[in-house]
Amino acid sequence: MRAVRQHGQGGALTIETVPLPEPGPGEVLIRIQATPINPSDLAMIRGNTLVSRYPYTPGLEGSGIVVKAGSGLFPALRKGKRVACTPVPGKDGAWAEYMVTSAMRCSPLPAHIAPEEGSMMLVNPMTALAFIDMARKGKHLAIVNNVAASALGKMLIRLSVKYDVPLINIVRKESQVEALEQLGAAYVLNSNEDGFREKLRQLARDLGATLVLDAVAGRQTSGLLEVVPRGSRLIVYARLSGEDISLDPALLIRDDKQLSGFYLGNWLQSKNLLFKMRLVHRVGRLLPDILASPVSRKMPLESVEEALHLYTESMSAGKILLIPAQSHRP
Ligand SMILES: NC(=O)c1ccc[n+]([C@@H]2O[C@H](COP(=O)([O-])OP(=O)(O)OC[C@H]3O[C@@H](n4cnc5c(N)ncnc54)[C@H](OP(=O)(O)O)[C@@H]3O)[C@@H](O)[C@H]2O)c1
């Protein structure tokens, strides 16, 4: 099969012909139909997130058809099904014609979900639902999110309207302000605009925004914690700035603010099977509109370097999907 390969930390990507992997016990072989480029893929390719072995195939989610089942009940149940899937951590990912993964990491795709939509069904939609539920259960009156023009940010905007939880959206380009307002965002601030900190302080106080979702980290984390109301909780869920976090401890001690992290994989591990099944069902219901991810381009695996270049040039423009060549065949 053809697969994208990387042979060392931060090294170039190559397209290679490699042996078709065999599913082991509890595993399935999936013919990949579509797989997106996500920021977490960039972090792994650049070597910012450690990969346990090389060569390896990137791709942290995708969709396809289960064409072979290893031993066990779950693999047998998935055989022949269209699924959304994620790789086993540390194993090869979805940027290939085929991927082997645990049957437990595959969710059947409802009939109304196309492979392209299904390939982006797990990571961002589940994270967006986790965040909106945290806000509601934690009795936070409003939320702040600082990568508001991202696919996940746009899901949060629609969820905030649906569940009537005000959301303060932070972007870093003026052109994104109007785009998000057209999506229904009531509050959009540009972090590069004069007076940003004071506007955020005032708005967060007025709305009672005590849940802060931070995908940038670094200096922005301390800047956000300084201006949000006393007792706020800030959740770091990515490190797009590449910076470390440095904080005045008084924010935590005196102002009773909390700092924690979120990683979907860990969060899901803390949930039981019934919860996860309900979550997948909820995602399936909301995927066509509220949890939709705009797609800017579909490109063949062979164009992965060009796809990465286009994606990093304009991340908020929409997802770029890699479509393996065999998926064009009937
Ligand atoms: N922890 C978890 O479990 C988890 C799960 C899902 C997603 N995430 C994270 O959620 C974030 C959004 O994911 P996505 O797939 O929705 O992203 P996406 O649609 O690919 O968009 C990426 C966004 O990040 C912005 N960005 C990039 N570098 C930035 C920086 N240094 N400062 C501020 N903004 C920056 C881009 O803005 P510009 O257009 O201005 O470049 C763009 O809006 C990612 O960081 C991802 O890793 C984490």
Image (spheres, grey):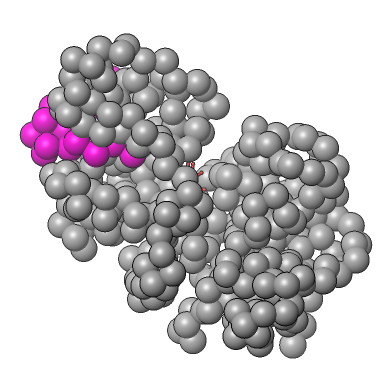
- Asked if 183 appears above or below 186 in the picture, the reply is below
Give the residue at x 72% y 79%: 71
Chief SS of the magenta region: helix
Which residue occupies 34% across, 20% down?
222
Q: Position of residue 207 (x, y in %)?
A: 11, 39
Image quarter of the C terminus: bottom right
* Residue 166 shows up from this direction: no
Residue 40 appears at what percent x and percent y? 58, 45
Q: Nearer the viewer, residue 192 or 256?
A: 256
Left or right: 126 as drawn, with respect to 310: left
Which of the image's four quarters has the N terminus? bottom right
Towards the viewer: 1 or 321: 1
Is 60 rendered above or below residue 308?
A: below
Image-quadrant location for residue 97: bottom right
Outermost residue on the left side: it is 206
Left or right, 271 with respect to 314, comes to left
Q: Residue at x 26, y 20 (%)?
A: 252
Residue 25 visible here: yes
Determine if the magenta segment contains residue 112. no
**Region of the chain picked out in magenta, as a range:** 194-213
